[in-house]
């Protein structure tokens, strides 16, 4: 059966890291560190407004000399980001990530934010592929 | 059997190596310019450490360190795990999974020769999912 984002790649209940657009970069980064995640979802009343990742921290804050205590997420997040639907196929999410260079994609179900999928969630695929290649070569 | 060199580590334009005394700010600027998620720390072609975007989150910004006053020596992972050029792709991928790494420096008899990242394996997993999806279309 073709793999779908939910429930095959991510579980049906994820603990999302959500913060308001007015939170500072410093506050967001502390939470990312605590939760061991690479991205924070910026929301208002459960509605997705943006995404801020560790790469954005590098490129939009530290590399350009912004002060993490004086910069709000709304200034440095990607507003209105690309998303995927929970019922979409895993292969489509992966294709979008590769094309656009994303490491994270928010997941919507009936327009409601329910999760986030990251490249790490696809790691199992990579191991499987390389193992199968190895097995294939050994047969020959 | 696919080996890191020459099968996986192909494009070493991305290799970014800086001295240990470089400030985090300077490193961030270089990483932004070169579109890389990790910088190697080296002296005379010898690997001393690695500093990644995740380290920026956890060791610099979450800790309140000043990127202008902090050197890579203070926040890098010293003496990181490495791979050798003749390692198989599967061995490198497993090492990354076990260690939770996104990058693995490649060292040949003490000399730094490249870096492999998980991105280098991504094309394979997409090909695999495409194949799977094509198979089900034929059956269905």
Image (spheres, rainbow, N blue to C red):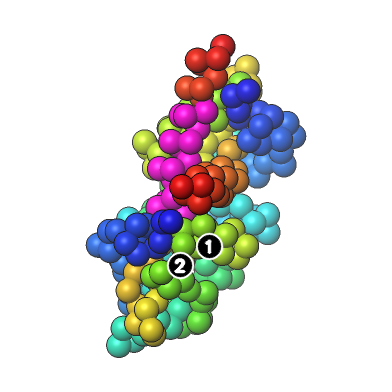
Residue A65 in sight here: no
Residue B121 inside the magenta-drawn segment: yes
- Note whether residue B123 is visible: yes
The residue that label 1 is drawn on is B91
Q: Is residue B6 left or right of residue A140?
A: left
Q: Is the residue B43 above or below the residue A101 in the image? A: below
* Residue for badge 2: B87
Going 43% across and 43% down the picture, which residue do you hit? B124
The secondary structure type at the circle numbered 2 is loop
**Where is residue A70 shown, x and y percent of the image?**
49, 57
Which of B5/A36 is in front?
B5
Q: Position of residue A68 (x, y in %)?
A: 49, 60
Left or right: B85 with respect to B92?
Answer: left
- Judging from the image, what secondary structure is the residue with disc 1 in? helix
| Quarter residue A26 falls in | bottom right
Q: Position of residue B37 (x, y in %)?
A: 41, 59
Q: Residue at x 56, y 64 (%)?
A: B95
Q: Mark 2 falls within which chain?
A: B
Is residue B38 magenta-colored? no
Respond whether the residues carrying marks 2 and 1 are from the same subunit. yes
The magenta span reads B118-132
Classify the position of the N terminus of chain A by image quarter: top right
Q: Residues within 10 Å of mark 2 (few under 14, many from 20)?
A: some
């Amino acid at each position: 059966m073709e793999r779908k984002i939910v429930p095959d790649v991510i579980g049906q209940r994820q603990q999302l890291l959500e913060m308001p657009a007015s939170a500072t970069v410093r506050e967001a980064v502390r939470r990312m560190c605590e939760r061991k995640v690479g991205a924070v979802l910026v929301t208002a009343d459960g509605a997705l407004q943006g995404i801020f990742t560790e790469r954005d921290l590098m490129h939009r804050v530290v590399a350009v000399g912004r002060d993490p205590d004086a910069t709000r997420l709304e200034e440095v997040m990607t507003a209105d980001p690309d998303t995927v639907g929970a019922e979409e196929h895993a292969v489509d999410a992966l294709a979008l990530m590769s094309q656009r260079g994303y490491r994270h994609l928010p997941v919507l179900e009936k327009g409601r934010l329910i999760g986030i999928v990251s490249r790490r969630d696809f790691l199992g695929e990579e191991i499987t592929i390389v193992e199968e290649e190895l097995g294939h070569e050994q047969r020959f | 059997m696919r080996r890191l060199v020459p099968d996986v580590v192909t494009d070493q334009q991305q290799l970014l190596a800086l001295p240990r005394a470089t400030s985090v700010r300077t490193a961030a600027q270089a990483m932004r310019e070169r579109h890389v998620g990790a910088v190697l720390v080296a002296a005379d072609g010898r690997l001393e450490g690695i500093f990644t975007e995740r380290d920026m989150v956890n060791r610099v910004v979450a800790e309140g360190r000043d990127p202008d006053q902090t050197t890579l020596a203070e926040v890098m992972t010293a003496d990181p795990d490495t791979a050798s050029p003749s390692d198989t792709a599967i061995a490198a991928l497993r090492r990354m999974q076990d260690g939770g790494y996104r990058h693995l420096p490649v060292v040949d008899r003490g000399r730094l020769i490249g870096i492999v990242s998980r991105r280098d394996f991504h094309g394979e997993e997409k090909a695999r999912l495409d194949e799977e999806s094509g198979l089900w279309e034929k059956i269905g």
